Image (tube, helix red, strand yellow):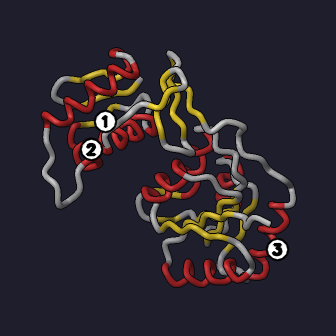
Amino acid sequence: MTKAKLFLLEDDPNLSESVTEYLETQGYTVTCAYDALSAEDILYENKFDLLLMDVNVPGGDGFSLLKSSRDAGNTTPTIFLTSRNAMEDLEEGFKSGGDDYLRKPYELKELLLRIQTILKRNFFHPPSALIDLGNAVFYDIENQSLLLNSVEQSLQPKEHKLLKLFIQHQGELLTHENIMEYLWGYDETSNDGSLRTYIKTLRKLLGKDRIVSHKRIGYQFR
């Protein structure tokens, strides 16, 4: 029997370790994140059977993160694990797409029972892991590849990374600074010329009008 894959967003390292160790002894596979930004990347690139999400985390909050994930088509059931106990917080949690709400501090056994209950409901992932970008272009989330007329396109690592950034932030104006920081690590030197080359390559595949240039500001993927 395949192990259920769980995702845990918890910024407290000790609690995260305790929950992970306990759930793994119960036969689950657990992937962890400690802040909203890394959680967003993990959720975008992976499929899970259940999400366990803290609310107050660095870089954002669990409610907003789940709402944006739901808006992108993620239907994975979710349990919020939080010290927030006001009725307004409970209401916001469910409105953002949560399926259950467990207040801290909680017993690990209770968490396990809630996990088992939700997984028994037989939630399903969306039938397709393909994002339709129009004009016979699709992005395959599971295999992380770009398909044009069902043929996989060859992309350099940074071109592929830039494409994922655009897809994650469709309609948003991304500044040159934000793009540079995302594409180049601390030990790398960013390059305007290389960025323009990557943009040119993606425009050839996606269509020239899909990536709009805002002079001296940045780019916008439509």
Few, some or many residues within 10 Å of mark 2 (<14, 14–19, 20+):
few
Residue type at mark 2 is: Asn
Location of residue 18 (image quadrant): bottom right
Can you tell which quarter of the image residue 191 is in?
top left
Name the N-terminal-most of marks 2 and 3: 3
What element does badge 3 sit on? helix
Q: Which residue is mark 2?
A: 178
To which residue does mark 3 refer? 113
Q: Residue at x 54, y 42 (%)?
A: 141
Answer with left or right where residue 113 lies relative to residue 166: right
Q: First in sequence: mark 3 or mark 1?
A: 3
Whole-angstrom CA distance, mark 2 to mark 3, is: 42 Å
Would you call the spot at circle 1 few (<14 residues within 10 Å), some (14-19), or many (20 or more)? some
What numbered label is drawn on residue 10?
Answer: none
Q: Residues within 10 Å of mark 3 (few under 14, many from 20)?
A: few
Seen in the picture, residue 212 relative to 80 is either above or below; the reply is above
